[in-house]
Image (cartoon, helix red, strand yellow):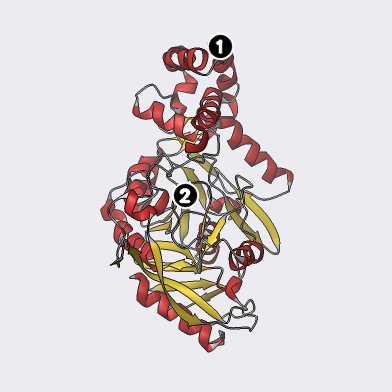
């Protein structure tokens, strides 16, 4: 399998880092692990030998020596966040994989996070729920053709021209609308130039690098950030991220053609969570929701925000299968559901008295969607030590099989705990 995608199939935080790390660590043939969208607003938690690690901008494969990690052109890169994250791992004595950064990736400058924060506050009750880390403004500059690319950091003249062009309108906004002080061009240029010496050895034409690797029969693992329901085109707009974390966006964000991809894995929780604002049909506001949050440790890796929790939504799973062309699912956190006598699963929505088996067409309809539940038998046994599907309780097996029937794609493997080894393979490759 020369090209594998690992994507979020809900609203993020599904455990993509676990799936990516598992593939990278257990498959000797994986040569590259690639991030293709988003920025340091993403968060992946990886547990290795009982020790917990968090990555944000770095690919999860950074903890797998032997694989080369790539931050591709579709990512927006904060140099400050990149080096802070690298240094935190190095300070823990971790052996890191080699890292390559695309020359065409866009840069998050300090003024992007400033604009992000003041704009979000200005929106008041209509806030999107951004992380305030400058991701959206950086992508906006990219689309408005006033963005700064990594390659620009190595030409001071071009860098200064681009910073001046970007701040020309930004400073009018800051001073005249938000009543904030203007940002000085010299300060921004000086800060960005301070990163060039350390960054230069990492920078390459990553599209060429990855296509040559595939031509040579090497295996490339594309690691998704955020998730399908946060996609700017296919998610719950406007409560979405600023990029395309679906399968098609991976191709654009890495500079590879869709015909190069062999396997597309959708990572999905055995229940559902969401961070930030926006509609969430299966969201729970009772003790069950509190229990899912507590047992599942549902706090955002990057944001520290408590995640909203709800039951598994098969409508969203089917939508993710369709939009991404999934070949399989990786189901995580099945162990969190231990102890419930009955486990509800959303199989459809009811909107104004009409049943919808597929995603509603409009935001208004989705906002008013009420879940139609099917109730499955639960289990009380501790499943964290199970290593084969047959070792799972019969009702847990039935739960997984029913989700597979409802979700439109086979479930390749199931996570029964946070550790790398706590995985049950349902359908061996």
Nearer to us in this view, 7 or 92: 7
71 above or below 264?
above
Please identify the residue farthest to the front as the structure is shown: 353
Is 15 rendered above or below residue 155? below
Foreground residue among 380 and 55? 380
Residue 406 horizontal/vertical position (percent) = 36, 74
| Residue 226: image tag | 2
- Mark 1 surroundings within 10 Å by alpha-carbon count, few (fewer than 14), some (14 through 19), many (20 or more): few
Q: Which mark is residue 184?
A: 1
Q: Judge whether 55 appears above or below 21 on screen.
A: above
Image quadrant in which the N terminus is located: bottom left
Residue 326, can we see it?
A: no
- Is residue 253 among what the camera can see? yes
In this image, 72 relative to 201: left or right? Answer: left
Residue 369's x, y, as percent? 37, 59
State the residue at coordinates (62%, 52%). Answer: 306
Residue at x-position 58% and y-position 37%? 82
Secondary structure found at label 1:
loop
Local crowd size for mark 2, using a 10 Å CA cut-off: few (<14), some (14–19), many (≥20) = many
SS class of the residue under badge 2?
loop
Q: Position of residue 17 (x, y in %)?
A: 54, 57
Q: Earlier in the sequence, mark 2 or mark 1?
A: 1
- How many numbered circles are shown? 2
The answer for how far apart the CA atoms under marks 2 and 1 are is 33 Å
Question: Which residue corresponds to the image point at 51% horizontal and 49% vertical from the top-left?
Answer: 68
**Which quadrant of the rendered structure holds the C terminus?**
bottom left
Horizontally, is 382 left or right of 324 in the view? right
- x, y percent for residue 46: 61, 57
Position of residue 153 in the picture relative to residue 320 (left or right): right
Given residues 320 and 57, the one toward you in this image is 320
Given contact means CB atoms under 8 Å apart, are the residues at marks 2 and 1 in contact? Answer: no
Residue at 50% of width from left, 69% of height from top?
270
């Amino acid at each position: 399998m020369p090209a594998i995608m690992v994507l979020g199939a809900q609203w993020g935080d599904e455990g993509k880092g676990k799936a990516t790390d598992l593939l990278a660590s257990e498959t000797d043939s994986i040569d590259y692990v690639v991030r293709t969208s988003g920025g340091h607003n993403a968060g992946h938690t990886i547990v290795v030998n009982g020790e917990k690690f968090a990555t944000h901008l770095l690919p999860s494969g950074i903890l797998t020596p032997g694989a080369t990690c790539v931050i591709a052109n579709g990512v927006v890169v904060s140099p400050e966040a990149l080096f802070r994250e690298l240094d935190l791992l190095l300070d823990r004595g971790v052996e890191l994989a080699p890292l390559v950064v695309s020359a065409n990736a866009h840069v998050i400058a300090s003024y992007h996070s400033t604009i992000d924060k003041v704009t979000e506050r200005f929106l008041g009750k209509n806030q999107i729920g951004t992380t305030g880390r400058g991701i959206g403004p950086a992508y906006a500059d990219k689309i408005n053709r006033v963005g700064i690319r990594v390659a620009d950091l190595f030409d001071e003249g071009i860098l200064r021209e681009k910073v001046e062009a970007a701040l020309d309108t930004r400073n009018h906004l800051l001073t005249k609308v938000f009543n904030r002080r203007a940002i000085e061009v010299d300060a921004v240029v000086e800060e960005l130039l301070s990163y060039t010496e350390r960054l230069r050895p990492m920078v390459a034409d990553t599209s060429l690098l990855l296509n040559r690797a595939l031509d040579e029969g090497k295996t490339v693992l594309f690691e998704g950030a955020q998730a399908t329901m946060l996609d700017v085109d296919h998610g719950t707009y406007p409560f979405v991220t600023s990029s395309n974390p679906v399968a098609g966006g991976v191709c654009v964000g890495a500079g590879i053609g869709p015909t190069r991809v062999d396997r597309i894995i959708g990572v999905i929780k055995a229940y559902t969570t969401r961070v930030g604002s926006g509609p969430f049909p299966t969201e729970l506001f009772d003790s069950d929701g509190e229990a899912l949050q507590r047992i599942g440790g549902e706090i955002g890796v990057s944001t520290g925000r408590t995640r909203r929790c709800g039951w598994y939504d098969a409508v969203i799973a089917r939508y993710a299968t369709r939009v991404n062309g999934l070949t399989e699912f990786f189901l995580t956190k099945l162990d969190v559901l231990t102890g419930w006598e009955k486990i509800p699963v959303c199989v459809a929505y009811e909107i104004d008295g009409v049943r919808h088996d597929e995603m509603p067409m409009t935001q208004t309809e989705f906002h008013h969607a009420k879940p139609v539940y099917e109730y499955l038998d639960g289990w009380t046994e501790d499943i964290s030590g199970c290593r084969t599907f047959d070792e799972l309780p019969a009702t847990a097996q039935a739960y997984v099989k029913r989700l597979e029937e409802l979700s439109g794609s086979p479930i390749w493997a199931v996570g029964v705990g946070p550790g790398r080894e706590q995985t049950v393979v349902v359908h061996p490759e």
